[in-house]
Amino acid sequence: MASNNFIDYVKINCRSGKGGAGSHHFFRAKGLPNGGPDGGDGGRGGHIILEGSSQLWTLLHLQYRKHLIAQAGEGGGENLRSGKQGEDIIIQVPLGTVARDAETGEKKLEITEDGQRIILTPGGRGGLGNDHFKSATNQAPSYAQPGEEGVDEWVILELKLLADVGLVGFPNAGKSTLLSVVSAATPKIADYAFTTLTPNLGVVAYRDYKSFVMADIPGIIEGAAEGKGLGHRFLRHVERNSILLFMIACDSPDINAEYRVLLSELEQFNPDLLDKKRLLAITKSDMLDEELEAEIRETLPTELPTVFISSLTNKNIQPLKDLIWTALHAE
């Protein structure tokens, strides 16, 4: 993913079409000067619809399209002719897109399947023609319903990447390096903090042609909840992950303390994240001999499976995949 092309948040104005007015026409013909009401119904106003597309991975195509205006429905006609419906606007979005009301923050819908279509902003209902209002006591109604107004609203679209495994760790923990080793993804890798500025996705090949999807998000630091570093901006991308793989470098002064800080930041963002399955990978372990590794293992948190890995030498990369696969398919 090119960082300048990855857009995961847009605010757009949606205006659905107004419904067409019903007709209050009366039938007239030679020999029938007092024909009955024959006004048709107005057409529905156009909807604004979101459609899931597995071919998209960003909201970039909506970044500069701020106003979506659907067509109004046409009015009803004589001889019970209904008005034409307003043309719908169908917007394709990546899987994992969530729509929220811009004013209240209330969730309106989410798109999770390819080809899934959901009405985001419904068009106004067309008005009923005067034929609907005739009765034994009112055989010549001279009125019909006006069309219903469309909806004019601001909507926020957020993208939450759909992945099986989310990588969580401080900057320079080796997350991008691992992703580049186990998949065909090519994230930016450098020896300074915050080289990853946007999330990256990679498909990890497993045994017998099986695979799973891994997501690397920018590193978080202590105080991210207060806006330090990149803050919590990208943590929404791990909300849909089945497993959180915590990654901490073996040269950390206190691995257990770093793990607790990461947990705390996740909890402040969304306490439900702590309910997800967790694994721990101690990275850059090619620097360790067996004695040092044994010493570090004694200090590690005991409530989650741990593996020492090295993306540089491929140390324990396959056992890590096995651990992830087992966790993904455990009941």
Image (cartoon, rainbow, N blue to C red):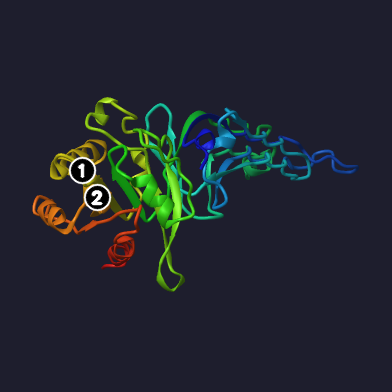
> Callout 1: helix, strand or loop?
loop
The answer to the question of whether label 1 and label 2 lie on touching residues, with beta carbons closer than 8 A, is yes
Using the rendered view, name the quadrant where residue 174 is placed.
Answer: top left
| Residue marked by disc 1 | 251
Is 113 or 225 nearer to us in this picture?
Answer: 225
Q: Is residue 65 above or below residue 189?
A: above
Dot placed on the residue nearer the N-terminal end, 1 or 2: 1
Category of crowding for the residue at label 2, using alpha-carbon neighbours closer than 10 angstroms: few (below 14), some (14–19), many (at least 20): few
State whether residue 124 appears in this view: no
Is 37 or 19 nearer to us in this picture?
Answer: 19
Q: Quadrant of the C terminus?
A: bottom left
Q: Is residue 159 above or below residue 210?
A: above
Q: Residue furthest right?
A: 30
Using the rendered view, name the quadrant where residue 98 is placed.
Answer: top left
State whether residue 198 appears in this view: yes
> Callout 2: helix, strand or loop?
helix
Using the rendered view, name the quadrant where residue 64 is placed.
Answer: top right
Instruction: Report the amino acid beneath label 1.
Output: Asp
- From mark 1 to mark 2, how far is it between C-alphas? 9 Å
Left or right for 242, reference 71: left
Q: Position of residue 39 (x, y in %)?
A: 72, 40
Instruction: Report the amino acid beneath label 2.
Output: Met
Left or right for 58, reference 80: left
Q: Position of residue 195 (x, y in %)?
A: 40, 35
Residue found 59% across the figure and 36% down from its top: 61
Is 309 or 49 nearer to us in this picture?
Answer: 309
| Residue marked by disc 2 | 287
Category of crowding for the residue at label 1, using alpha-carbon neighbours closer than 10 angstroms: few (below 14), some (14–19), many (at least 20): some
Residue found 16% across the figure and 44% down from its top: 255
